[in-house]
Amino acid sequence: MKLPELKIADLKLEFPIIQGGMAIRVSMAELAAAVANEGGIGVIGASVMTAKELKAEIKKAKQLSDGIIGVNIMFAASGFSELLQASVEAGIDVIISGAGFSRDMFNVGKETNTPVIPIVSSLKLAKISEKLGASAVVVEGGNAGGHLGSDEYSFDLVKKIVGKINIPVIGAGDVVTPEDLEKMLKLGVDGVQMGTRFLASKEASVADNFKKLCVEASSEDVMKIMSSVGYKANSIKTRFSELIKAGEAPPPANCTDCLKSCTKKFCIKDALVAAKAGNMDTGVFFTGEGIGRVNKILSTKEIFKEIKDYFRE
Ligand SMILES: Cc1cc2nc3c(=O)[nH]c(=O)nc-3n(C[C@H](O)[C@H](O)[C@H](O)COP(=O)(O)O)c2cc1C
């Protein structure tokens, strides 16, 4: 199979691959630029950054790459509108948003001529997105990393949406290897978004023991927790994620109201910050169920080389 080119609005990608944005400063300029340099879209996970910090990060990514740089902003985050504004002011190439759905971002996209790509988990939202002016949709199932909008397996969900809308469909969830990519493309998607594979990359900004955990974990080590955002999320089984599941995790100690709405049963931000730092006692380690097929920490260049070699054969 030949790897197709992907066109989103006026943007032409050499590889039909979007690196999933990862909040809490996990996908930063270094990773985004590395992916953009390979011909995909590199995405900075904006949530929890200040507007000033995000602008500086976008500037840094653009200094490191002439490729396509996007931001991912969680709609559920209190700072959503401010970060959206900061991104367009900094000249971002694409806006991607998950964990909720913003109608306003489409207006910002139109006013600034910036493609907007929502992450959706139903045909209904995919159709609404097209009507509102989305340049593409990421369709993400319940086996993906990060917060989830559906329990359905991504490959099944994608089948329900491909062919039903006239904008590019990007499949996300459980795409880790070149074989997975081929399988997803054969369903008729225009491209894929991959998070877990890039989380276990040299350029991802997480502690080495988080990456080690990724390499050692099997798919059976992934469990669902109910995040305080109000969505389910996949995370590696640890003592702390079991505590959350049992409803015994401690309530937030220093709440900064980082979310528009929070159950306040525990602090997901603190738990993700702890995971990023590699703290096995208090961290929540988000990964997709495809983690079992991540056997090595690779550089972004090596990840793309594997894909290039596979599709050349
Ligand atoms: C550690 C981690 C953090 C994530 N953070 C975000 C986020 O801030 N916003 C978002 O929309 N998606 C987030 N995601 C989801 C990814 O962008 C991507 O859609 C997902 O990882 C795709 O599934 P995969 O992990 O099976 O490849 C995150 C995923 C991971 C693994």
Image: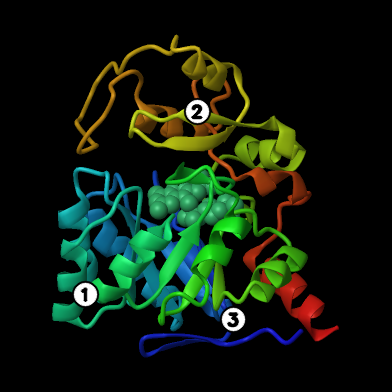
Q: Quadrant of the C terminus?
A: bottom right
Give amino acid for label 1: Gly
Q: Are marks 2 and 1 in contact (CB under 8 Å)?
A: no
- Please provide percent x and percent y for residue 37: 54, 78
Q: Secondary structure at mark 1?
A: helix
- Compared with 224, 66 (above or below) is below
Q: Nearer the viewer, mark 2 or mark 3?
A: 2
Q: Earlier in the sequence, mark 2 or mark 3?
A: 3
Q: Secondary structure at mark 3?
A: loop
Q: What mark, if any, has residue 15 been given in the picture?
A: 3
Q: Earlier in the sequence, mark 1 or mark 3?
A: 3
Task: Judge: label 1 CB < 8 Å from ligand 1.
Answer: no
Q: Secondary structure at mark 2?
A: strand
User: Disc 2 to disc 1, how far (Cα)?
Assistant: 33 Å
Answer left or right for 259 relative to 169.
left
Disc 1: which residue:
109
Give amino acid for label 2: Ile
Give amino acid for label 3: Phe
- Compared with 305, 28 (above or below) is above
Q: Quadrant of residue 156?
A: bottom right
Question: What residue do we see at 80% from left, 85% from top?
Answer: 312
Disc 2: which residue:
225
Task: Judge: label 2 CB < 8 Å from ligand 1.
Answer: no
Task: Judge: label 3 CB < 8 Å from ligand 1.
Answer: no
Q: Earlier in the sequence, mark 2 or mark 1?
A: 1
Answer left or right for 80 relative to 293.
left
- Please provide percent x and percent y for residue 172: 55, 60
Give the crowd class for mark 2: few <14, some 14-19, many >=20 residues within 10 Å: many
Q: Quadrant of the N terminus?
A: bottom right
